[in-house]
Amino acid sequence: MAVDRITVDKITWDRVGRVTEPGRYMYTFGWLTITAGDLDIWKQYPRAAFTLLAHASEPDESIAGEFRLGAFDVAPDAPLPFTTH
């Protein structure tokens, strides 16, 4: 039997419901831990998109359904800047 899984590479503040407090939140893809630093970035750059990282408690051991935020893009859908040579 095949199991359908949702693949989430990037996540935005809108997607997490614009949470205002750090904490551990349940979403359709699993548990997401959001830190005060993550929220500070979203407050400064509301359209930033973070990379979603699987959380591991031990090296080589990932906990299914536990995620945290990684690197981010400030304006993920912004057009590339025009440059001249």
Image (tube, rainbow, N blue to C red):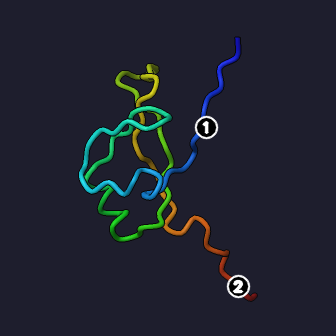
Kind of residue at disc 1: Thr
Q: Nearer the viewer, residue 10 or 14?
A: 14
The residue beneath circle 1 is 7
In this view, the residue in front, 78 or 5, is 5
Crowding around mark 2 (Cα neighbors within 10 Å: few <14, some 14 to 19, many 20+) is few
Residue 80, image x and y in percent? Answer: 67, 75
- Which of pointers 2 and 1 lies earlier in the amino acid sequence? 1
Cβ–Cβ below 8 Å for labels 2 and 1?
A: no
Q: Quadrant of the N terminus?
A: top right
Coordinates of residue 18 in the picture (x, y in percent): 36, 57
* 70 sits left or right of 22 in the view: right
- Image point (66%, 75%), residue name: 79
Q: Which residue is depicted at the point 58% across and 45% down?
A: 9
Answer above or below: position of 29 versus 58.
below
Name the element at disc 1: loop
Percent x, y for residue 7? 61, 37
The answer to whether 20 is drawn above or below residue 70 in the figure is below
Q: Which amino acid, mark 2?
A: Thr
Judging by the rendered image, the residue that carries numbered circle 2 is 83
Q: Is residue 8 above or below residue 39?
A: above
The residue located at (33%, 67%) in the rendering is 43
Residue at left 65%, top 26%? Answer: 4
Q: From the viewer's perspective, is 80 left or right of 72? A: right
| C-alpha gap between disc 2 and disc 1 | 34 Å
Q: Quadrant of the C terminus?
A: bottom right
